[in-house]
Image: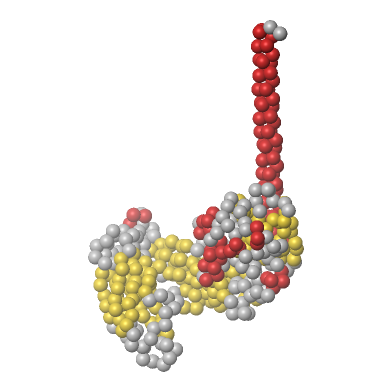
Amino acid sequence: MNRKSSIETVFVYALASIFIVLVLYFGYRGISGLYSAREQSILDTTKLQIKADMSQIAMSYNSVANFQYELPKKYNAICFVDLSVAGDEEEERDMLIGSFPIILDSVASGLTNNAFFVQSINKAATAVGDFSVQSASAGAVELFDIGKIRTCPDSFVCFPKQGNKVSFQATGKGTYVMIGNETACSSLNLPPVVTPQTSTFTEGWIDSELDRYVGTYEAMVEDDRDEFLNVMWYFMGQEQYSDIIPNGSTTSVTVDAPVCRHQLKIVATDSGGKTGSATFDINIGLNGNSPPETRNSPPEAVLTEPPIGTNLKDGNLYNFVMDINDAEEGMLNYSWFFGDDETEVSGNSGDRPANEMFESITLHIATLTGQTGETHDYTFSVTDAGGISCSRVLRVVNT
């Protein structure tokens, strides 16, 4: 074989090798692309199917069903979070979620995502059904919203994948779904859920302190077991309206709000004494028909010490701290009244920029000399540079 033939042969083999490599490369990319497309299709289909199934079973009160879904290979479990809990239960839930920063961030941001495909989970914890989520670990997470749900036995539950599928049980509750083992759920008495149906923040304006801002506020009340619930509306520290309403129904109240900052609160109580609540912030300012720059917003007063609910004992020394603030610049004058109609202490913030907090502190020896259980009203008043005066009544009990 001459030199020219050898060179041609080597060249042919080189071209063939390049061709084979290209075929393998693009073939792999094609197969990989098809695989990725299939995994994405499973992900999208499963998310839509779960949402549709939960919406359907929710409408069938107390119906129980087992659901099974295929998960993409990337994920090993599905988790659900109860966004309706509050107070101590909310803190407990967030501790459970702590292993998943992405989920915790979603919840803290006020997003409606309540279902999550998670990638990393402790394999030792993959018993059938829900398991201790404290054994979960961080990893890739797919977040989505499947409508209104509650979860049990905890407010954050996970279900591990068995093979390529995940299973869980759900119970319809009329307007929402309870996700978790029905036997375990039925033994619990979860607190009612109060869901505002109108905005929880109102900024209104009136033209004279003699006027009133009239507003109607509505909330839906739901419970996991009771057919009827007691509801109580409170406004300006006083009972405004009470009723007994069917589970899953709405209740409303109309209030006449004077100029100031107010909080309207609804409390729902079930037969087991568990309560759920929601609050509406109502801020009413002056000069409503004037240009925005001449309007006067009410000052704000927030009690920071002693903590709300503290029992005050006769003769003890207490440090009362009220943070005050106003949207407009200028001086804020304040006064404390301690139940005897005499001003115990007064002062002012001095000239201050708009929206700057000022801390008002006074020491006072409580003189609760009445009968145990007697209530005493301590009043804090603050007046802004535009003349709006707001008061907060702090009701304490002699212990």
Residue lying farthest front? Answer: 1
In which quadrant of the rendered view does residue 28 lie? top right
Looking at the rendered image, the quarter that the N terminus falls into is top right
What's the colour scheme? secondary structure
Residue lying farthest left? Answer: 350
In which quadrant of the rendered view does residue 334 lie? bottom left
- Residue 49, compared with residue 192, is above or below; it is above
Query: Observer-nearest residue: 162 or 152?
Result: 162
Q: Residue at x 33, y 76 (%)?
A: 320
Residue 123 locus on image (x, y percent): 65, 58
Query: Observer-nearest residue: 288 or 145?
Result: 145
Q: Image check: 163 left or right of 390?
A: right
Q: Residue at x 69, y 56 (%)?
A: 161
Residue 203 locus on image (x, y percent): 43, 61
In which quadrant of the rendered view does residue 372 lie? bottom left
Residue 260 locus on image (x, y percent): 39, 68
Q: Is residue 250 visible?
A: no
- Residue 62, compared with residue 344, is above or below; it is above
Q: Residue at x 64, y 68 (%)?
A: 152
Q: Image check: 181 left or right of 95?
A: right
Residue lying farthest bottom? Answer: 371
- Residue 100, compared with residue 23, is above or below; it is below
